[in-house]
Amino acid sequence: MTALHTFAVSNVHGVAALSKRMTFGRSTKLVAYTLAALLAACSKSPPPPPPPTAVTAIKVVSHPVEITEDYVAQTEAVNTVEIRPRVGGVLDKQLTPDGSHVKHGQVLFVIDQQPFITALAQAKAQLAEAEASQQQAERDLARVRPLSSIDAVSQQELDAAIAKFDAGKASVAAGEAAVRTAELNLGYTTLTSPIDGVMGQAQLRVGGLVTANTTLLSTVYTTSPMYVSFSVSERRLLEWENEHGSASISRTDEPLPFHIFLADGSEYPYPAKLNFVDAAVDQRTGTLRMRVGVENPKEMLRAGQFARVRFVSRTVPNGIVVPQRAVLDLQGKNYTWIADRESKAQQRDLTMGPRVGADWLVSKGLEPGDVVIIDGAQRLKPGAPLRVQIVEPPPADSTPAPAKAGDAT
């Protein structure tokens, strides 16, 4: 019995006597209320402890972890040829539909040939005229030369005959050149594909006027193999070279593991191999251009697509990873909640490494066997009792997010 209870019991008779002397109903009620409050206070017991907090946790295990880096990339054809005419005129025919596979030498377009056929005929006629004049000059020289030896004609007449003969030869040479030029121009009216590939969309329809060496008619792309280009910072390139022990990443003894992911997040099934590292850093962006080559037999890749290149930079043999939602931040420091052997909540400071998909590599702070709380840690306090449900950690999500045109390198 508490002191308060003793005080209340010992004063019951005094209070009763006092109540008899009271003549007002209010005073009687006040004394009764006071007595009831004293008796209720002494009957209270200590509050029960709070129930354990339900949380979800995982048990930490160590396993080899691949540290990967993703870079926004863009596909490009190994060879891209613009089809431009060497002569001007009216586009007469398009013999290959847009988007068709073409072979080297296949006819794509034909420019109206009639003006060039006429020009060739005229050049041949001028050549024939020049040849006739040259033959006449040759006969004249043959008659004059013997007469000059017996002084039957003057030296001036002989010189004139020789000059006329030489001029005839020059005219013939000029006529032959004009014929060859006309033949070339006529041949240029037929535009063929210089490579094997796929023809793009025609930029001018039949009947349109083309300008020599200016008008773009179409583009032919080589579809296999394909290039995938991306850029890395100068600092990261130096780290790569130090990690792989080579003066140049493009001359490593073993091919570096590059993986290509398409815009929908799926991995491209064919392996990629680094084949180009630019010789100079872009001063505007501070990055270095790199390129991998990949086969494209099914034409899944097309020039200009956005993709993502993944590079496995290193492997941690006994790495510990936890879901990113299990790591909390307080004033720049990372920590997590764990359940100790008595199923009570404890904070654990962490030193974090790089992110691995949806998880986070822990460099320091956790050991195999620790129980890390991943859900339900929002209102925990140190020492709070827990009701822990341990779940299997999900497999590491190694698929990157779909690449977008606006993503930064």
Image: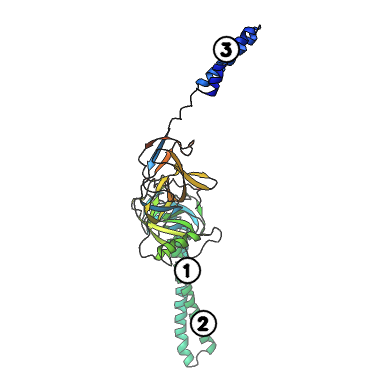
Q: Is residue 149 visible?
A: yes
The residue carrying mark 3 is: 13
Cα distance, mark 2 to mark 1? Answer: 22 Å
Q: Is residue 178 above or below residue 392?
A: below
Q: In this view, does 108 lie above or below 43?
A: below
Cα distance, mark 3 to mark 2? Answer: 162 Å
Farthest residue toward the right? Answer: 23
| Residue 86 percent across, percent down from the top left | 48, 61
Instruction: Say if mark 2 contacts mark 1, CB within 8 Å.
Output: no
What's the residue at 44%, 81% (across, down)? 139
Q: Residue 178 carries which label?
A: 1
Identified by mark 1, the residue type is: Ala
Between 53 and 61, the one lying in front of the other is 53
Identified by mark 3, the residue type is: His
User: How many tags in the picture?
Assistant: 3
Identified by mark 2, the residue type is: Ala
Between 100 and 80, the one lying in front of the other is 80
Disc 2 secondary structure class: helix
Farthest residue toward the bottom? Answer: 150
Please report whichever mark, 3 or 2, sits nearer to the chain's N-terminal start: 3
Disc 3 secondary structure class: helix
Q: Which mark is residue 163?
A: 2
